[in-house]
Image (cartoon, grey):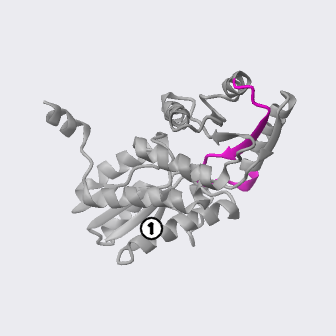
Amino acid sequence: AVIVAVHTGAEDATAQQQINRFNTRLKEAYPNYDFREAWTTRDLIKQSSDDSPIKTPDELFSQLKKDGYTHVLVQSSNIINCAEMQFLRYAVETAKENFKQIRLGEPLLSTPADYEHAIKAMAAAYGNEKEANILMCSGTASVEDSQYAMLDYTLKDQDFKEWFVGTVDGYLSLESLKKQLKTNKIKKVHIIPFTFAQSSQTTASTIKEWAQNLQEAGYKVTTELRCLGDLDAIMDIFEKHIKHAEKFRRYSAKEMKMIAR
C-alpha cells in the first residue's frame, strides 16, 4: 500500500516547508504505508533532473503499477475543486484498472462543514479584531470561483461580519471587494493569503500590490504572509478527507445517476 501526496508546485524554500508539513502529516497518519509525491505544475516538472525526477500523477501511477502496489490512497493540497483537481480525478479514474483499490481524498473546501472549520482556523490564527480581515485567494477566472463566493457567504452566515474575500484572478475581484469595504464603512484592513503554499516572493509581491491599491483608495493596511499550510487545524481537514476516502468509495457520475433513479 502507498499514500500519494499531490501538490501544485513549490517555487522556493518557504513553500517547500509548508508542503513538507503536509507530507509529514500523511506519513504520520499512515505509518504502515509507503509514501510518494506527484506534481501538477508543468514548469516545475520540466526543471526536474534525472537524479531527482518529478512525476505527474499519471506518470507516478504507472510507476506504482510496475512496482507492484495494489492499494493507493491519494490526497492533494488543493484548496478547491479547481482544474488541477479535475485533472487529478481523471488520472485516478483512468488508473483504477491497474490496482485493487485507488482512492482520492477531497480538496480542503468540499462540504459546508469544511468551510466553517477553515474559517474558524483562520480567525483563530490570523484574525485582527481591530481591522477588517481580507482573505486573498488565487482565483480561477471561471465558474470554479463560485466556491470563493461560498466562502464569503459562509463568513457572513457564521457572523464573521468583518471578514471579506477577494481573488487575484477571478471573482470576487479586488474592485468588487473595495465596493464591499466602502459599503461597510471600513477604514482599516488586514490582508491574509488564502493559499496552501506559495513562493514567498510571489505571495509578498501580490500582497504588496493589493496593499498599495487599498492604501491609494484611503485604507490603512496591514498584511500577513503565512499561508494555510502553516496551520495544524487546516491539516486536520485534509487528514479527515483522506481517512474518509480510505473508508468510502466516491460514486461516479454514472453510478449517482443510477442511484437517483
Q: Amino acid at mark 1?
A: Leu
Residue 218 among magenta residues:
no
Whether residue 85 appears in this view of the structure is: yes
Instruction: Determine which quarter of the picture holds residue 242.
Output: bottom left
Residue shown at 83%/27% (left/top)?
217
Residue shown at 48%/43% (left/top)?
80
Give the image location of residue 126, x and y in percent. 67, 52
What element does badge 1 sit on? helix
Magenta region: 184-201
Q: Is residue 259 above or below residue 69?
A: above
Between 44 and 202, the one lying in front of the other is: 202
Give the image location of residue 235, x and y in percent. 50, 60
107 sits left or right of 212 in the view: left
Instruction: Give the class, few, some or many, for how many residues have Cα within 10 Å of label 1's Cα (few <14, many ≥20).
Output: many
Outermost residue, bottom side: 32
Q: Is residue 25 above or below residue 47?
A: below
Whether residue 43 appears in this view of the structure is: no
**Residue corresponding to mark 1:** 26
83 sits left or right of 18 in the view: left
Q: Quadrant of the N terminus?
A: bottom left
Q: Quadrant of the C terminus?
A: top left
Residue shown at 69%/54% (left/top)?
199
Outermost residue, left side: 261
Q: Is residue 46 above or below residue 147?
A: below
